[in-house]
Image (spheres, rainbow, N blue to C red):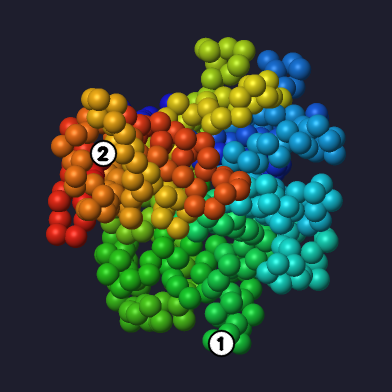
Amino acid sequence: MKAKSHSLKAGILEGIRVLDLSRMLSGPYATMLLADHGAEVIKIESAEGDSSRRSGPFKEDDLERNWSGYFISLNRNKKSICLNLKNGDDLAFFKKLIETSDVLVENFRPGVMNRLGLSFDEVSKINPRIVYGSISGFGSDIFGASPYKNWPSYDVVAQAMGGLISLTGYDEENLLKVGPGIADIFSGSLLSFGLLASILKARDTGRAQFVEVAMYDAIISMCERAIYQYDFNNIVPKPEGNGHPLLAPFGIYKAKDGFIAIGIVEDTYWNILKKIIATDDILNDAKYGTIALRAQNRKELNDKINIWTERFSKKELVNLLGGKVPFGPVNSVKEIFEDKHVRKRDMIFEIEQPSSKEKKWKVAGNPVKFQGFGSLNSKPPILGEHKKLYVTNLDPINSFNPRHSFQPQQKDYRCKLTFSSINNKVLELYACSFTWLKSSQTYLICSLSKSEFIAYENCFSSVKFHFLKVISGYDGYKNDVNLLNTKLSNKNITDVSIIDTKFEILMSVKL
């Protein structure tokens, strides 16, 4: 199931460079979401590599244990560089990469980046527009000093402390951890949102941004229902098994050959379901007539629903309920692989193995879809595979790069227009102001002094637009500006629209 581009270009995030210092699950998941959509993610690893490389499982023919499923799933579409950040030369090289990057992501315990000299304050001195993303168990002092800030934390700890485990299981004596690493994955998803929001703000303001997700905080957010239940009713929510404390029928029910899910909220769906079941005690019992009554009598109602569903196989229940009420079979991963929905929506990626183009790895796809853009599915990197590439060239390496469309703003840049005639006469003017107009194409519109321009307007054969930084010093967008200036150099005067208004001359040129 190859990721399809639908005949359109892949990579809505191309042009964004991410330095990924994270490892294991939460940080790599966040950067994977970005890499799948075209961001240039450079994974910085120690000589031993991300520990997920060694975590397994491994294919039987991978005798050297080079390719762990754990690593492959989270690190596709990335580049790998091995660096020892305690080594002066490696640290200096890493700082050069910071200068040309949009984002840095780390998920170390608080204090580690400070000891390396790579705190947010230090990194933002190197690149004043950097977005600095951090995931940890309990966060940093910046947003409130947690008494647990120095505690190590993994998924199960966040599930426990954030309240998720207290709500999961059949009763208070038999609690259950949620199967997948939900604290890591949810934290990573939230961080990817935070990174993109911060990139927008950093590009608008020209200032670096720090964005943080504490895994404990993320799970509290996930358990939002428990928070308002306690506030509104002074109830400490407990495990509800496969049911719901406020709704019925809502949960997991038995079938002949497995289980199915039903989720009835609105009375409309209840009226449809009871007609399908069509037993007298369901059709005619007034105890189930409203949402509140069904919730009040949920144990009895769920038992009756279970008796009915057990009469049918999952396939029969699909035919009876599918598309009529909120319903779905409980799928095993084998059934997910066989589901047409999964194939149609590219939710299992096939990635070529480095050693064989015939055999492919299968990993979970990216659920975020963008109209007009596909997802990438290139192989994960060999440890340190791209060090030489970046040592010889620090420029972004995406084939399509929106940095070419960087739009300087007046608070940061001036625009100089150099007009040339066929007789090599030159006139230089600075735009009084400039703006960008985007419709189906992007246009630069410059305002010029009418008195300075009007005497020469019929003499010019070409014009060169050139952006200069208002305040001298480090410019995190130097490469972007150089590319833009190259693109706008030596425009034929016939390519430029000149509008003579009452007070000024407006010059419009298409990017």
What residue is shown at x 69% (from left), y 43% (from top)?
A: 22
Mark 2 surroundings within 10 Å by alpha-carbon count, few (fewer than 14), some (14 through 19), many (20 or more): some
Residue 35, position as x, y percentages in the image: 53, 37
What residue is shown at x 42% (from left), y 50% (from top)?
A: 414
Badge number at residue 510: 2
- The image quadrant where one finds the N terminus is top left
* Left or right side of 282 for 493: left
* Left or right side of 320 for 32: right
Name the foreground residue: 34 vs 259.
34
Residue 209, position as x, y percentages in the image: 59, 57
Name above or below for residue 250 compared with residue 339: below
Name the foreground residue: 246 vs 135.
135
Identify the residue under disc 1.
233
Closer to the eye: label 2 or 1 = 2
Residue 207, position as x, y percentages in the image: 56, 57
Which numbered disc, 2 or 1, marks the residue that appears first in the sequence?
1
Name the foreground residue: 47 vs 363.
47
Name the kind of residue labelled 2 in the image: Lys
Q: Are the residues tagged 2 and 1 within 8 Å (C-beta)?
A: no
Q: What element carries label 1?
A: helix
Quadrant housing residue 485 = top left
Q: Is mark 2 on a helix, strand or loop?
A: strand
What residue is shown at x 80% (from left), y 67% (from top)?
A: 148
Looking at the image, the residue that sits furthest to the bottom is 233
Badge number at residue 140: none
Name the kind of residue labelled 1 in the image: Asn
- The image quadrant where one finds the C terminus is top left
* Left or right side of 128 for 370: left
Residue 275, position as x, y percentages in the image: 26, 65
| Residue 12 appearing in the image | no
What residue is shown at x 20% (from left), y 41% (from top)?
A: 456
